[in-house]
Amino acid sequence: MVEVKNIEVYGLTRAVNAISNSFNVGEINTLKEPSDNIKKIAEKLGSNMAAHQSHDAWLKGILVSFDMKGNGVFMPEFQRYHFAELIMSQSTMHSMEKFMNSDYDPFTKYVSQATREETIKNYKNWVAKKAEGNKDEIYKAFEILVHNLPRGFELWVTVSANYLALKTIVIQRFHHKNREDWQNFVKACYSMPEFRKLCGFDSPEWNLENW
């Protein structure tokens, strides 16, 4: 199921300080430690949930990178958010033999044994066609293999996002039917520095046990 690791957060101090740009004249310095007053304004603006307002837009300055393992059920839902950039992912095109011949299990726990066996059969058919050397047959065998991979086939991907993007995702996916995957994703977001406080998720209604 979904797993997020190697989280790195950049620019939190600079994004908070950028709020004061609207009230300054002349030179600015967004690298200094934010004042208590600016921190309070940041929390107030960042936690704004009102529709048709963009007071929380400063959150997009807090940049996040992480590695994530997703599956064919979760990833199409995640990829609708164009502001979360997929840097590079694992590839069935380049590494199918490694997937099939390593100790790594690329299937979620919900993939049936029959589907696993069908995938292995399609893989062995592709290997046999490669041995025969007919390019057209090799192509067809590989297409059969990848087109019939189950949605529970998992790949790791490196992602670049920001707090504003992640805030939107959490709001839209909280209480989602695909509970295991999205709870793991939200839990990862909650582990980021000051994420819940700055984005307005610090009230009990946003606790994971209230999903």
Image: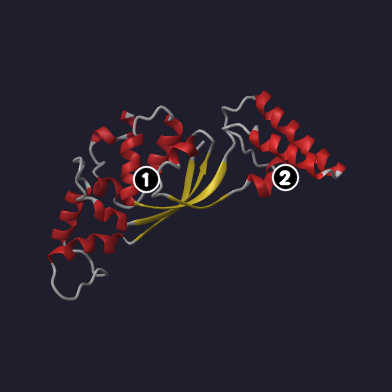
Look at label 2 and name its amino acid.
Glu
Along the line of sight, the residue nearer the viewer: 131 or 104: 131
Could you tell whether 60 is left or right of 2 in the image? Answer: left
Q: Residue placed farthest to the right in the image?
A: 132
Residue at 34% of width from left, 48% of height from top?
165
In x, y percent, where is residue 145? 70, 36
Residue 167 picture quarter: top left
The quadrant of the picture occupied by the C terminus is top left
Residue 189, which numbered label? 1
Q: Residues within 10 Å of mark 1 (few under 14, many from 20)?
A: many
In x, y percent, where is residue 129? 82, 39
Nearest to the eye among marks 1 and 2: give it.
2
Residue at 70% of width from left, 34% of height from top?
144
Look at label 1 and name its amino acid.
Cys
Residue 9 picture quarter: bottom left
Image: 208 above or below 167: above
Residue 97, which numbered label? 2
Residue at 20% of width from left, 60% of height from top?
19
